[in-house]
């Protein structure tokens, strides 16, 4: 299998074979296959969160930019925000039972598959261009420095 | 930024107020203390797993499943709660949990120090004095806000906490021992308990130094309406007993870097529990429950092979199961 091109920054990988949902620090990657997309947390979220202990997903309908689940690390609960509207048709039980796999390999740890309602789901908050990803992730890293 | 210095409240109100303020996007600091005793579990916990429900009912101990993280805690009038509610888009709010806790726990640390207790921050969200935890904290996103929740432990009922937790008796004893060794209180440190009002004044001053002046908040009808709405939701069995992710091990955190994990193993005609104490990510102790269906010499051998190894939950489970199998015992799962 050919290895996907990726951006490596501060030890975090951002493969270029997928898109990234960046609204309000969502840090969700998405990989469309027809009208179904697989989504997961990106390397920045996995790195910043620390060891993820719990993951919970609401099955059924999801709305773009609304929470569809939550994950907990370091006694802090973060929400998972959906990049698209549609219906969750599959949940990755392996990741649900052992969410630390997201820390180990965020891009092999898809969380849910969503059947999208409208293929025209592109928005300014979903990016895939290399330069855009680079600019966005550098901005996110810069934010953590003022912490 | 609003300040809600509310004094003593009914137990449920101490939780509902900060959830409602977050859903209403009201950036604020809430200080309160419950007039009754209750147990609170984190968002990803199920009270059926965590608590001795019969004991709680028999002793009028309320149960609340909050939307923020952290473990199961006993809360009562001997604690002073602080809840900080900030919009997640507010630029002063760090993304990473560790940075969030480090930043917003500073006023609490300074309050303890002004009281004469040399508290230090221990990542990720513990406040410790002489290596003992003195404040429990958790956080999370509620609506569009990020919320810090924690308490100043004026005093603590260790025995009641151990009784209310869902543990076998041998585990309760161990849990109580660990709590006594690792958890301290203002009363233990100072031998007196300062007035709650005085502590609140210091907390307000320290939070204002970090966040700027605050104005007195008024509990308007939109807040009370939201509290009533949330009360219905949070009191329902559907919310309270929502089944979360099934975990490989059940885990009880004693303090940062120290946890107790345990698992029930089913055998063909019996069952037994293995308890492990994990300290600084190493297996410190392995305990087999009474009547564990394995000879003492085999138990000793397993212990000697596991104590000191690096903690990895999957691998630990695999190793234990394989070792039990190697002794020819009919482990089912």
Image (cartoon, coloured by chain):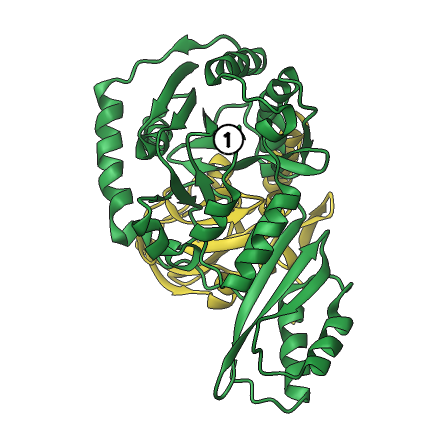
Give the quadrant of residue B38: top left
Question: Badge 1, how many Cα within 10 Å: few under 14, some, many 20+?
Answer: many
The residue shown at (55%, 85%) is B331
Q: In which quarter of the view is residue A66 placed?
A: top left
In the picture of the structure, the residue carrying the numbered disc 1 is B151
Q: Is residue A14 visible?
A: no
B243 relative to B219, above or below: below
Which chain letter goes with mark 1? B
Instruction: Please provide percent x and percent y for residue A56.
Output: 43, 55
Local SS, label 1? strand
Q: Which chain is green?
A: B
Residue at the (58%, 15%) spot, across then down: B210
B47 to A125, vertically: above or below: below
Asked if residue B120 shows in the view, the reply is yes
Q: Residue furthest front?
A: B191
The x, y position of residue B265, in whole percent, is 53, 76
Please provide percent x and percent y for residue A120: 36, 49
Residue shown at 37%/35% (left/top)? Answer: B143
Colour representing chain A:
yellow
Quadrant in which the N terminus of chain B appears: top left
Determine the residue positioned at 64% across, 86% down.
Answer: B325
- Counting labels gives 1
């Amino acid at each position: 299998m050919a290895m996907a091109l990726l951006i490596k920054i501060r030890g975090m990988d951002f493969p270029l074979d997928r898109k990234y949902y960046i609204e309000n620090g969502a840090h969700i990657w998405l990989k469309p296959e027809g009208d179904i997309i697989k989504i997961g947390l990106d390397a920045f979220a996995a790195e910043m969160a620390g060891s993820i202990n719990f993951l919970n997903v609401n099955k059924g309908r999801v709305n773009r930019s609304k929470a569809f689940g939550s994950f907990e690390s370091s006694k802090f609960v973060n929400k998972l925000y959906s990049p698209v509207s549609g219906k969750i048709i599959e949940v990755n039980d392996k990741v649900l039972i052992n969410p630390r796999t997201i820390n180990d390999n965020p891009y092999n740890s898809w969380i849910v598959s969503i059947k999208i309602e409208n293929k025209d789901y592109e928005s300014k908050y979903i990016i895939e261009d290399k330069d855009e990803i680079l600019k966005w992730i550098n901005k996110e890293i810069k934010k953590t420095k003022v912490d | 930024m609003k300040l809600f210095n509310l004094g003593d409240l009914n137990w449920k109100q101490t939780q509902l107020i900060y959830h409602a303020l977050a859903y209403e996007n009201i950036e604020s600091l809430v200080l309160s203390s419950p007039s009754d005793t209750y147990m609170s579990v984190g968002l990803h916990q199920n009270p059926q797993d965590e608590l001795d429900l019969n004991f709680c009912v028999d002793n009028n101990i309320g149960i609340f499943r909050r939307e923020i993280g952290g473990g199961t805690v006993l809360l009562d009038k001997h604690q002073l709660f602080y809840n900080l509610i900030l919009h997640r888009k507010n630029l002063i709010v760090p993304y990473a949990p560790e940075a969030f806790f480090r930043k917003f726990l500073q006023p609490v640390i300074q309050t303890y120090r002004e009281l004469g207790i040399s508290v230090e921050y221990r990542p990720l969200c513990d406040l410790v004095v002489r290596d003992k935890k003195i404040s429990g904290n958790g956080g999370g996103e509620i609506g569009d806000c990020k919320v810090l929740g924690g308490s100043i432990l004026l005093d603590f009922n260790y025995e009641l906490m151990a009784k209310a937790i869902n543990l076998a008796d041998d585990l309760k004893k161990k849990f109580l021992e660990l709590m006594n060794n690792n958890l301290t209180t203002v009363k233990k440190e100072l031998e007196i308990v300062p007035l709650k009002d005085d502590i609140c004044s210091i907390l307000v001053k320290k939070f204002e130094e970090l966040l700027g002046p605050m104005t007195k908040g008024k509990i308007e009808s939109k807040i009370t309406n939201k509290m009533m709405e949330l009360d219905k939701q949070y009191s329902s069995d559907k919310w309270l007993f929502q089944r979360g992710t099934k975990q490989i091990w059940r885990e009880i955190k004693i303090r940062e870097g120290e946890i107790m994990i345990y698992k029930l193993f089913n055998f063909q005609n019996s069952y037994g529990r293995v308890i492990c104490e994990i300290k600084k990510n190493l297996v410190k102790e392995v305990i087999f429950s009474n009547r564990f269906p394995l000879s003492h010499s085999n138990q000793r051998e397993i212990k000697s092979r596991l104590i000191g190894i690096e903690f990895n939950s999957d691998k630990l489970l695999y190793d234990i199961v394989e070792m039990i199998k190697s002794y020819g015992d009919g482990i089912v799962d």
